[in-house]
Image (cartoon, helix red, strand yellow):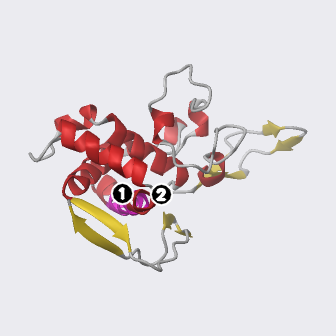
Amino acid sequence: SAVIFMAGYETTANLLSWAWFILSQDAVSRTRLEEELDRVVGRRAVTFADVARLPYTSAVVAETLRLYPPVPILAREAMGDVKIGPRVFPKGSLFMVVAWLLHRNPKLWADPDAFLPDRFLAPAGSARLKKPNKYAYIPFATGPRICAGMVFGESEAILALAVLAQRFRPELKPGTEVRPHCRLTLRPGDTLPMILRKR
């Protein structure tokens, strides 16, 4: 549990920072999020049971994870010789898996640079927003070394976003330039000045 707490707080904080930045720039998505919260939760306290009843809020979190994965680069060591195309890499080779690029690959994602939470709600037959296979979306890694805190982290982020969006509407401070910085985790620079408006 100590590992989950220590590894999880910064990644969740960065995820929420990116979500607020995106929502401050996208009034349509922000309005849909607020409408879902008003309809499902109202003014009462948000509870864990609400996570399953907030599909759009969950989709906002998932799409934020796609565009701004908190851990954008993963290192993996080959357990045996690996052939990729014409090249053979010997056992022990180090591979860098770049989720940032994978999540924005136009061969895998329609409108890859657009913030479209609906891609995580679309029916399986929807060609424009269809999610590719599970290896194209790896904000928590995949395989035997998938993040132990995945379910906890997703639920925590959905609840935190819901609690804050229920009462506040953060707006990016005018004149702020936001640029991604990778220092193990992906951050929106050193600061992200926001103005809190009460809803």
| Residue 148 visible in this rendered orientation of the protein | no
* Residue under numbered circle 1: 12
Residue located 66% across and 52% down the image = 101
Q: Amino acid at mark 1?
A: Thr
> Which residue lies under the disc numbered 2?
70
What element does badge 2 sit on? loop
Find residue 105 and report its image quarter. Answer: top right
Image spot of residue 169 (x, y percent): 28, 61
Report the predominant secondary structure element of the magenta stretch.
Answer: helix
The one of 118 and 149 positioned closer to us in this rendering: 118
Give the residues in magenta.
Answer: 6-19
Image coordinates for residue 128, horizontal then vertical, percent: 61, 31
Q: Secondary structure at mark 1?
A: helix
Return the x and y of residue 40 as percentages of the image width and height: 19, 36
Task: Please name whichever residue, 14 or 147, is drawn nearer the observer in this view of the structure.
Answer: 14
Amino acid type assigned to the residue bearing label 2 in the image: Pro
Q: Position of residue 179 (x, y in %)?
A: 55, 71
Residue 13 magenta: yes
Residue lying at the far left in this picture: please name it.
44
Q: Residues within 10 Å of mark 1 (few under 14, many from 20)?
A: some
User: Residue sitting at 63 percent across and 46 percent down?
Assistant: 112
Q: Residue furthest right?
A: 86
How far separated are the C-alphas under marks 1 and 2? 8 Å
Report the quarter where the C terminus lies.
Answer: bottom left
Residue in the picture at 55% in, 68% down: 180
User: On residue 171, which mark appears?
Assistant: none
